Amino acid sequence: MTELLVEDKGSCRVLTLNRPEKRNALNDALIAALKAALREADENEGLRSIVVRGAGKDFCSGADLEALQKIATASYEENLEDARNLADLFTLIRKVNVPVIAAVHGRALAGGCGLATACDLVVATRTARFGYPEVKIGFVPAMVAAILRRNLGEKKSFELLTQGFEFSAEDAHAIGIVNAVFEDDAFDTAAIEYASRYDKVSGSAVAMTKRLLYDVDGNDLSTAIAKGVETNAHARMTDDCKKGIAKFLEK
């Protein structure tokens, strides 16, 4: 079975985690397939968005049993390399030019919740469930901590990462992890319609905004504004901006 299904819906590239019998648990093959698909999509100038979703009942349940067994018997160096493999996927999502949107149904737990959190945007069904339960087995949701802390305040991040409880899509929306919640029976269509919002805006402007937004994390105010000045000037030189200004002036 192919671990990842790739399909285009207009200008949206849909990547479907395809291990439904394993609740789309992450393994080396699926992570490698996701990386390859993201790099390939990034080279396609006709795409405006990427949606990541899961086949079957769940979005993604985290690492599978085989991966956990490997962790239990691996050396520190082997575990370091394995952790870097997943970390590279999270980093790649932020480097892709177009918005990457997690479309979560069912459960997004552990590494699966980390994958969703690593995406630029998250939409979910009303019945979706989220959680970082790693601490229950002595594990640490370590790479996603850096991303979650950029999404949420210190106290809420601490609570979610150290108590291991599941929480609803409505709760995730209320605290700012989920951007939009849709009804279950209309979710597939609603997720693509949400992604299609990027058909109506400048692709180059979105790409530059994404790069700037993540680049200024951790900068002091002066440095962040200086980077904004450079991005602003570069944006003015793009064809999209020149055409947009001309069209506006014609009104």
Image (cartoon, rainbow, N blue to C red):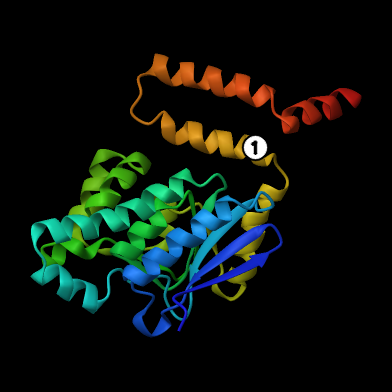
Residue 198: image x %, image y %?
A: 66, 48
- The residue lying at 68 percent from left, 65 percent from top is 9
Farthest right residue? 250
**Neighbourhood count class around disc 1 (C-alpha, 10 Å): few under 14, some 14–19, many 20 upward:** some
| Relative side of 131 to 186, left or right | left
Q: Quadrant of residue 97?
A: top right
Report whether residue 79 is seen. yes
- The residue lying at 67 percent from left, 55 percent from top is 196
Q: How many marks?
A: 1
- The residue lying at 28 percent from left, 44 percent from top is 146
| Relative side of 69 to 246, left or right | left
| Relative side of 122 to 62, left or right | right
Q: Is residue 116 above or below residue 231?
A: below
| Relative side of 154 to 1, left or right | left
Which of the two residues, 50 or 84, is positioned nearer the viewer here? 84
Report whether residue 101 is seen. no
- Quadrant occupied by the N terminus: bottom left
Residue 149: image x %, image y %?
A: 30, 42
The three-letter amino acid code for the residue at tag 1 is Ser
Residue 245: image x %, image y %?
A: 79, 25
**SS for callout 1:** helix
Residue 63: image x %, image y %?
A: 27, 70
Residue marked by disc 1: 204
Q: Quadrant of residue 204?
A: top right
- Quadrant occupied by the C terminus: top right
- The residue lying at 37 percent from left, 52 percent from top is 90
Q: Quadrant of residue 173?
A: bottom left
